Amino acid sequence: MTTRPDYIPRNILAFSVFMRNMLDYVKTHKTAWGHIPAAVITDLTGLLEDLDVILQETAGQSNAAQNLARREAQAAATRGVRAFVNQYLRFAPVSNVDRVEMGVPNRDTIPTNIPPPSIPVEGTLSFPAIGLVEMYNIRPSGEKSDQRSKHGVRIYYGVMGEPSETNKFRIAAPPKTGNDLPHSVFTRRLRHRFDFAGENGNKVYFCLRYENSKGQAGPWGKIISAFVP
């Protein structure tokens, strides 16, 4: 597999332009894609606005405090961009063309010997506090698999209820497979905590599957469900 240079510009002005162009494209296509919560876009826009304020306030200045302020604002915005890209832009409905337009690299198409994941994955639920549901002990379902084929796990989920403009992740009927769950999060860890504040007593469904470093997904695991405490 070849190694690409980092797609995020190191120069702060070039980074600001890159981030703005990406956000403009996302805002134009978010309705058609339908999987990115409005609050996530608002948070990312806030990081860009914070960066713009620092750039305006320190324009033409270069003392130690102002340089530190610029670095900190850029670092915070960069962390936000990386997390956003990895969670929302790496998979369908976002297309390869969309990613090119945003300056986000597509998956490496150079063949390697790493196979796609071949077995299901499962996890166990715990309830650490009111509104919190944690998926832990994420593990292969049954037999062991080739560790090279596992890059991480995508956890699909949805909460029962009538879908609305502000709660698009709700589902109206119990899912049959992970394809019926509208939202997902990717993790390389063996646990992930969900905050379902305000959903107390509602039923939540999960389904997991492995993804390797080329974005190839394994088979679906079993549907897991629980009531939000």
Image (cartoon, rainbow, N blue to C red):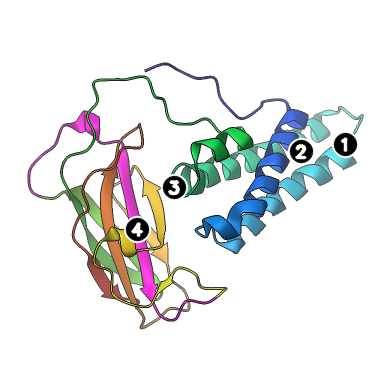
Image quadrant holding the C terminus, namely bottom left
Residue 58 - label: 1
Residue 92 - label: 3
Q: Residue at x 43, y 44 (%)?
A: 91
Q: Earlier in the sequence, mark 4 or mark 2?
A: 2
Q: Secondary structure at mark 4?
A: strand
Tell me if I can see residue 40 in this picture.
no
Residue 199 in picture, x, y percent from top left: 43, 78
Looking at this view, is 161 or 14 the one in front?
A: 161
Q: How many marks?
A: 4
Residue type at mark 3 is: Ala
Looking at this view, is 30 or 53 the one in front?
A: 30
Label 1 vs label 3, nearer the camera: 3
Residue 8 - label: none
Q: Is residue 126 above or below residue 108?
A: below
Q: What whole-number distance in Å separates the C-alpha atoms at marks 4 and 3?
A: 13 Å
Residue underneath mark 4 = 156
Q: Residue at x 76, y 35 (%)?
A: 70
Q: How many neighbours does mark 4 have within 10 angstroms: few (below 14), some (14-19), or many (20 or more)?
A: many
Q: Earlier in the sequence, mark 1 or mark 2?
A: 1
The magenta segment is 142-164
* Left or right: 145 as drawn, with respect to 20: left
Q: Secondary structure at mark 2?
A: helix
Q: Quadrant of residue 104?
A: top right
Q: Quadrant of residue 182?
A: bottom left
Q: What whole-number distance in Å separates the C-alpha atoms at marks 4 and 2?
A: 38 Å
Q: Is residue 150 magenta?
A: yes
Residue underneath mark 2 = 69
